[in-house]
Image: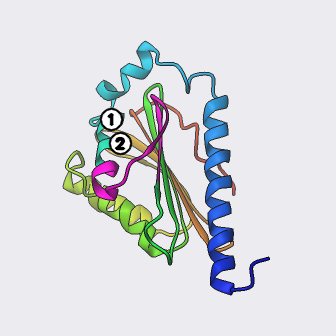
Amino acid sequence: MITNESAYCAHVGYRFRRVGAALFLGLAAASPNAARSTPSAQLAAQALPFSFDEVVAYFHHVLGNPSFKVNDRLFVFVDSDNLDESLTIAISSVEQKISILLLTTGDFGLNYIREFFEAPFFREAETERFYGILAAGFGTRSTEFARFSTDTGIFEMQGWIILNMEFRPNGLFATSVPKNM
């Protein structure tokens, strides 16, 4: 039995990260296209102005800790160095879409997304619009940029902030951001 309140919170946070990651990984593994590399999946780098590998390399550099490679199209990063907040970032690619799922318990984790918006493969105008999406608060929104489109969902549940952002070529439909939550 855990008696210390902070130890209990850390234990619950650890279990939530494990369950959240397992749920995400299970859903990704259940996708018929998630585990196999198809010619259309290889075109993702050509359809978007940045590639899946560039996004994974960016987070690897920024977080400074290794990712968990689930398969060639799904990587998970867990920041276990911060004792005050939890952070898990999953990056996946299915065909011509790249998705980022962030689970965090506070603003510290959102800083990684803010920094990602300033990655070298984004233009300044795109970065400014990303900040606007984040500033709009919780909910879902679709945004069309000149070079790509995004579907973003930002939610809060029992102290957790959940951000899901899908990047896709203009004209493709969204698949990962839940509507009406």
Q: Which mark is residue 147?
A: none
Name the spot of residue 106 as percent of width and height, x first.
Answer: 51, 74
Name which quarter of the figure residue 8 lies in: bottom right
Amino acid type, residue under disc 2 in the picture: Val
State which quarter of the image contains the N terminus.
Answer: bottom right
Q: Residue at x 74, y 78 (%)?
A: 2
**Which residue corresponds to mark 2?**
56
The part of the chain drawn in magenta is 59-77
Image coordinates for residue 120, horizontal then vertical, percent: 19, 49
Disc 2 crowd, CA 10 A, few/some/many (<14, 14-19, 20+):
many
Circle 1 packing at 10 Å, graded few (<14), some (14-19), many (20+), is few
Vertical placement of residue 143 versus 75, above or below: below
| Place of residue 127 in the rendered image (x, y in percent of width and height, measured from the top left) | 28, 57
Dot 1: what SS?
A: helix
Q: Is residue 157 visible?
A: no
**Residue type of the residue flagged with mark 1:** Asp
Depth order, front residue of 18/2: 2
Left or right of residue 30, residue 41 in this image: left
Residue at 33% x, 49% y is: 60
Kind of element beneath mark 2: helix
Q: Which residue is mark 1?
A: 53
Tell me the colour scheme of the image.
rainbow
Q: 130 left or right of 89?
A: left
Q: Residue at x 39, y 32 (%)?
A: 169
The image shows residue 51, relative to residue 125, as above or below, that is above
Q: Cβ–Cβ below 8 Å for labels 1 and 2?
A: yes
When asked about the image quadrant of residue 108, the answer is bottom left
Q: Is residue 169 left or right of residue 181?
A: left
